[in-house]
């Protein structure tokens, strides 16, 4: 079947994603922009819609847009708060790395996979990062990517539901709303397009340098640091995040097809058990952060989720969590795992 040109693919992706968003919102499901769009495009992909290949720069631009939205929350007061995040960020990173190694050992015993493949497949470090490192260690890269994919998709589906339920019972309305507002200076004399130019340029530069989650982090830091210091950049209107949510969710949905479903079936039950253990571990970590640092539980739950930085930042924005905390804690988690996990695995394989 002839592939649809990528501009038309992108248009169809947004159309289907928007329908998925409306359906999820209609049923009052959490994170309808991201998850609704993902489910909608996944169904279309499994049914065989001839998607064209969307340029990677589209994904980079959407991630940079999320970074701009988060950077819009920076001001002089928020920069002072960042100094208090070092201890919880390292706690999250070390906790997740330890549970990832333990889960990998359990997966290896349940499936008979070689240790490197099992540990890289279970580690909460991201599909791209873990697949690249797994290649260097001679692990089965396709299996690592598949294991990461199943775990992460399960997290995207479950964490918003769990977060919404628990936050309703543990967070007061005032506590959740306290971190939800954007600092949007309507009186700023700087044009809005300058915020976009700076954010997209910084995101693209960080992505080109190969930094982990470079597009979102580069845009977030550039916009945030300027807003909190020398230049009063205007914040983006709230509708911008919906554009990013539906786009990123749609791109996730494109990764589904019938062949992937068949491959998933062979490892489904071990990975479901593994994902359940990691979810319980994330819940334990979230309640620990909530108890020690008195953060709203919704922020703690999203900071503890073993999923991608960009997507959890999007969900944090949509669920009125502190997206700044969530994104920074996930950044530290990804960087720590990428740096520290390979030598740990080298020791285990000796």
Image: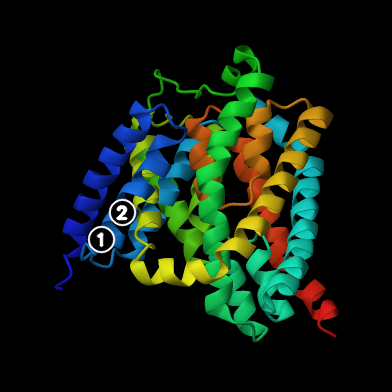
Residue 158 in percent (x, y) is at 55, 43
Which structural element holds mark 1?
A: loop
Q: Is residue 192 left or right of residue 11?
A: right
Residue 145 in percent (x, y) is at 54, 70
Q: Quadrant of the N terminus?
A: bottom left
Q: Quadrant of the C terminus?
A: bottom right
Q: Name the one closer to the observer, 74 or 85.
A: 85
In the picture of the structure, the residue carrying the numbered disc 2 is 43
Classify mark 2: residues with Cα within 10 Å, few (<14), some (14-19) or many (20+). some
Instruction: Tell me the residue at 27%/39% (across/down).
Output: 18
Q: Name the one closer to the observer, 228 or 273.
A: 273
Instruction: Tell me the residue at 45%/23% (across/down).
Output: 184
Classify mark 1: residues with Cα within 10 Å, few (<14), some (14-19) or many (20+). few
Residue 304 in percent (x, y) is at 68, 43
Q: CA distance from mark 1 to mark 2?
A: 6 Å
Is residue 229 in view from this perspective?
A: no
Which structural element holds mark 2?
A: helix
In the picture of the structure, the residue carrying the numbered disc 1 is 47
Q: Using the rendered view, name the quadrant where residue 130 is placed.
A: bottom right
Q: Name the one closer to the observer, 128 or 3.
A: 3
Q: Is residue 29 left or right of residue 276?
A: left
């Amino acid at each position: 079947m002839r592939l649809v040109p990528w501009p038309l693919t992108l248009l169809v992706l947004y159309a289907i994603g928007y329908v998925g968003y409306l359906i999820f919102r209609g049923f009052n499901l959490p994170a309808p922009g991201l998850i609704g769009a993902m489910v909608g495009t996944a169904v279309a992909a499994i049914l065989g819609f001839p998607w064209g290949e969307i340029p990677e720069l589209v994904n980079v631009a959407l991630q940079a847009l999320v970074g701009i939205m988060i950077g819009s929350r920076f001001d002089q007061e928020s920069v002072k708060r960042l100094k208090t995040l070092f201890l919880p960020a390292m706690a999250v990173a070390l906790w997740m790395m330890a549970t990832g190694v333990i889960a990998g050992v359990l997966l290896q015993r349940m499936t008979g996979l070689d240790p490197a493949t099992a540990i890289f497949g279970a580690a909460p470090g991201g599909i791209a990062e873990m697949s690249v490192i797994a290649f260097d260690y001679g692990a089965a890269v396709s299996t690592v990517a598949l294991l990461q994919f199943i775990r992460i998709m399960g997290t995207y589906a479950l964490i918003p539901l769990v977060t919404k339920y628990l936050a309703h019972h543990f967070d007061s309305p005032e506590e959740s709303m306290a971190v939800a507002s954007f600092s949007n200076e309507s009186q700023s004399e700087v044009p809005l397009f300058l915020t976009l130019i700076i954010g997209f340029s910084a995101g693209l530069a960080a992505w080109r340098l190969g930094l982990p989650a470079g597009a979102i982090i580069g845009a977030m830091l550039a916009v945030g640091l300027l807003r909190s210091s020398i230049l009063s950049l205007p914040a983006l209107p709230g509708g911008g995040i919906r554009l990013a949510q539906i786009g990123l969710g749609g791109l996730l949905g494109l990764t589904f097809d019938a062949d992937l479903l068949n491959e998933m079936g062979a490892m489904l039950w071990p990975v479901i058990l593994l994902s359940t253990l990691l979810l319980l571990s994330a819940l334990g970590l979230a309640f620990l952060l909530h108890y020690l640092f008195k953060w709203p539980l919704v922020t703690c739950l999203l900071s503890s989720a073993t999923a991608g930085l960009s997507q959890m930042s999007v969900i944090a924005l949509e669920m009125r969590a502190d997206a700044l905390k969530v994104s920074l804690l996930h950044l530290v988690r990804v960087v720590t795992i990428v740096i520290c996990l390979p030598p740990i695995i080298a020791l285990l394989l000796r």
